[in-house]
Image (spheres, grey):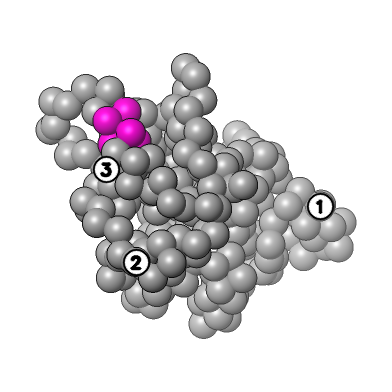
Amino acid sequence: MVDILVVEDERDLNEVTCMYLRDAGFTVTGCMNVHDAYEAMHGHLFDLVVSDIMMPGTDGFAFAAKLREIYAHLPIIFMTARDDIASKKRGFHTGVDDYMVKPIDFDELVLRIEALLRRAHIDDEKRLSVGNLVMNADEMTAAVEDEEITLTTREFNILFKLLSYPKQVFSRAQLMDEFWDTDSYTGLRAVDVYITNLRKKLAACDGFDIVTVRGLGYKAVPR
């Protein structure tokens, strides 16, 4: 499922947007401000962000700029009442991918989201190809040169996450939060064991390396 973050300080519009996107088949988290959005993103990576501009505290421009620094390929849509060309220029120069002016046509919003996801190679099939490795999240399969690699569910999910965001560093805590049960008593070093196993199983892969970032965690780096 595609996971979308909606950041909108008008409660009714936030709720309606989230409801409409869920009805369209997306998984949606709604936040009322940027602070709450950062909290929602801690240990969790979204496939797309829909954000207002005018919000209390940090505004949408600063939020989008920060996201673009951290997530180079994360699709971002502005959904705002500001229809002046200066705001549009600032938004696109900040790094947003699309800009919609309120009142929002939700059918159009869904179409724009689907188009952005296609361009970002994050679609319903969840198919990912890096070098000679091909992964399919719907089928939970991974293959190198058409030879299937046996991965556990957790190994598959960790690898798919790393490869979906190349060069993005994931801490052990982030990976634990997302892929281990909340009541698990497993220590953070369990992540190291999984990474070691993945490196062994992926020795024949020619398109990337799983790199240790000392003191931080891990990232997938294309060759």
Neighbour class for label 1 at 10 Å: few (<14), some, many (≥20)?
Answer: few
Q: Secondary structure at mark 3?
A: helix
In the rendered structure, are the residues bearing label 1 and label 2 in contact, judged by CB atoms less than 8 Å apart? no
Q: Nearer the viewer, residue 35 or 153?
A: 153
The image position of residue 101, as x and y in percent, is 68, 68
Image-based side of 30 in relation to 59, left or right: left
**Of the numbered discs in the image, which one, if any, rests on residue 17?**
none
* Disc 1 target residue: 93
Q: Which residue is located at x 18 percent, y 35 percent? A: 182
Give the quarter of the image for residue 25: bottom left
At label 1, which amino acid type do we have?
Answer: His
- Distance, label 1 to label 3, CA atoms, is 35 Å
Q: Residue furthest right?
A: 86
> Which badge, 1 or 2, comes first in the chain's sequence?
1
Mark toward the viewer: 1 or 3 = 3
Chain part drawn in magenta = 191-196
Q: Secondary structure at mark 2?
A: strand
**Of the numbered discs in the image, which one, if any, rests on residue 147?**
2
Rendered-image quadrant of the N terminus: bottom left
Q: Nearer the viewer, residue 39 or 184?
A: 184
* Disc 3 target residue: 179
Q: Which residue is located at x 41 percent, y 46 percent? A: 203
